[in-house]
Amino acid sequence: MKRKSIIVLVSIIIGAVFLLPACHSGDHTGETLIENASVYIVSENVAAGDVIMALEGQKYKSHPDSSLAPTEAADDVILTPGGPRYRSHYFQEGVENPWAPVETTSILLSANNKTVDLTYRADIEIKAGEAASNILLINTTLEDIRSLKLYAVDLPNGIAIKERARWHGSLPSLIAPVIIIEVSQDIQVQEYSFEIGLEINDVDFGVIPCRLEVLPGL
């Protein structure tokens, strides 16, 4: 009888463990904090046409058609009063845009009965030794964004992520950090996966999946 009671007690404990709610810890393996941008941009102070280039040392130039510009790419980020846009999504009256659209994905994240609407590039093709831009357009819809932290999970060797700039919308619930994904010259040509997490107002909303296909460099 005593042995039977012990077995029942152990079963209850095991069942209770499996019923515990799942949680996302900020101290999981392979987590790398993405340092906040040193450049902060508010919508009222943006000069339309300013550009954030993906490569280091090419942060800004005054106009997208400047003769001093380095090689242009579809995912160069152009600042507009309505928020950052990829070069392929930037249109001017009477000017043809020859770039193929950059594909983006929208996802809803929830935590503590709060929801975040996030649009970003989930799949990126990039050549070894180059860099790509990724705009994380974040809208909390109801709550003002007072703080934002980004982190990468299981980031492969040879890949680095930097936040180049952070745009604040006219609404306090809207923010768009611009991150740059850099790939080393000697990285192996293959497909890589990692995750980017975000913490808003001290609430961890979990991670979003990212896939990077590295192609042979020049």
Image (spheres, helix red, strand yellow):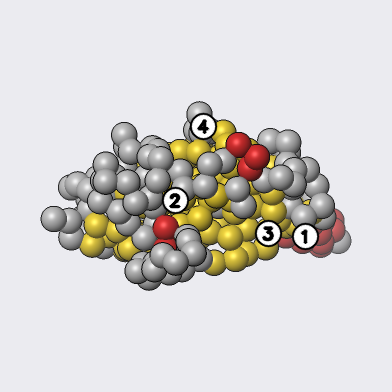
Q: CA distance from mark 3 to mark 1?
A: 29 Å
Name, please, the residue furthest toward the front.
94
Foreground mark, 4 or 3?
A: 4
The numbered disc on residue 19 is 1
Label 3 or label 1, whichever comes before in sequence order: 1
The front one of 25 and 151 is: 151
| Callout 3 crowding tier (Cα within 10 Å): few <14, some 14–19, many ≥20 | some
Q: Which residue is mark 3?
A: 117
Under circle 4, the secondary element is loop
Q: Which residue is mark 4?
A: 39
Label 4 or label 3, whichever comes before in sequence order: 4
Label 1 or label 2, whichever comes before in sequence order: 1
Q: Which residue is mark 2?
A: 77
Displayed quadrant of residue 189: bottom left
Under circle 1, the secondary element is loop
Label 1 or label 4, whichever comes before in sequence order: 1
